Amino acid sequence: MSDPHIPTDGVVQAWVALIRAQRLVLARVEADLKAAGLPPLGWYDALLELRRAGSSGLRPVELEGRLLLEQHNISRLVDRLEAAGYLARKPCPDDRRGQMLVLTETGGELLLRMWPVYRTAIQQHVGRKLADGDADQLATLLKWLF
Amino acid sequence: MSDPHIPTDGVVQAWVALIRAQRLVLARVEADLKAAGLPPLGWYDALLELRRAGSSGLRPVELEGRLLLEQHNISRLVDRLEAAGYLARKPCPDDRRGQMLVLTETGGELLLRMWPVYRTAIQQHVGRKLADGDADQLATLLKWLF
DNA sequence: TCCTTTTTAATGCAGATGCATCTATATCAA
DNA sequence: TTGATATAGATGCATCTGCATTAAAAAGGA
């Protein structure tokens, strides 16, 4: 019986492939966005969460959980998005330490402009590479790592 | 027949899962290394390539291809590794623009110290999460994305 | 040979991230 | 209520990355 602390060759290969595949694919998708004159993916993710939250908005601390970013990174990402006019900071009614982040109209428009480019990039760099059914299988396997 | 530029739901899910899984797993592995007082993974990758190259060493431009890093990042990573004493820059016999990077003894020792921690982390955060056979399957699917 | 183009590597500067710390407010226990 | 502790968010500082540019040498063509 094998030592439970030592990964099999297959596990190490999966690890290496995971790192490399994500780096390659992410770099390609980001490059497509940049080539279209659009902001980076992180902006899309944040604004998308705000759109999902609707008019009531989201607390920075909630964004933190959804985006898997550290608190200080959220704080600065929000700074940039606010400076660019894509979200607004509003006072938080029931917690004076906090704030509500709401998507502006311009922010909503940015999401609409980004999605076609983003969607095409996903298809080019992920969908096109996988046979039918492989994508679902890949998603299922990856979710075990969460 | 569906538009070839529009990803299916499964493809989008695979994309999202790929990004999230890699970020989570990488962050956990890096945290384990840091907790053990060891340098980041990027250092391991670079030094490992140098060990593979043997006593003749590697050119920075070759490292670039193997590590999927940009030229300026290689240049600075090499700066840090040299400053830490893990590699040496030697003149390149047949190209006076270039240099040969060789692993120092200390660098070799670092690799030996890092691997047990790294290996355990891979098993904890990848191997332990997957059923038998899933790792191989995952690696196979991910390689299609290269 | 001479001149142009390419390749290799370094660097100045701006932008982004990690880390620790700080302020303000909320929560909770005595 | 008061005081201790915890939580939300911002910020200074060092480090790291991206981008553009530069310098030096190699390669190639007239």
Image (cartoon, coloured by chain):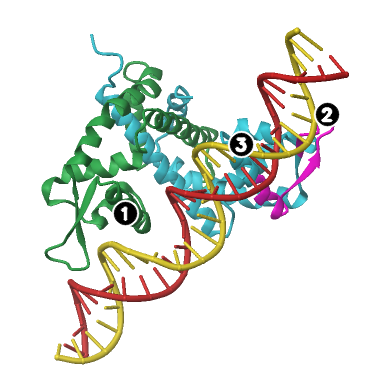
Chain colours: A cyan, B green, C yellow, D red
> Where is residue C7, by image quadrant?
bottom left
Three-letter residue code for mark 1:
Asp
Q: Is residue A54 visible?
A: yes
Q: Nearer the viewer, mark 1 or mark 3?
A: 1
Badge 2: chain ID: A
Location of the C terminus of chain B (image quadrant): top left
The answer to whether any part of residue A112 appears in the image is no
> Which chain letter goes with mark 3?
A
Quarter of the rendering containing residue A75: top right
The residue identified by callout 2 is A94
Residue on which disc 1 sits: B79
Tell me the crowding category of disc 3: few under 14, some 14 to 19, or many 20 or more residues within 10 angstroms, Cα based: some
| Residue at left offset 56%, top offset 33% | A68
Give the residue pinned by disc 3.
Answer: A71
The disc labelled 2 sits on which kind of residue? Asp
Residue at the location (83% across, 29% down)? A94
User: Residue A125 falls in which quadrant of the image?
Assistant: top left
Secondary structure at numbered mark 1 = helix
Vertical relation: A52 (above or below) B89: above
Q: From which residue to which does the magenta span run?
A: A78-100
Q: Are marks 1 and 3 on the same chain?
A: no
| Disc on res. A100 | none
Compare residues B14 and B32 and report the one nearer the observer. Answer: B32
Q: Is residue D12 above or below residue B129?
A: below
Residue A48 lies, in percent from the top left, at 66, 40
Q: Position of residue B96 (x, y in %)?
A: 18, 68
Left of A90 or right of it: where is A22? left
* Inter-mark Cα distance, 1 to 3: 31 Å
The amino acid beneath tag 3 is: Gln
| Residue C28 % position (x, y) | 74, 13
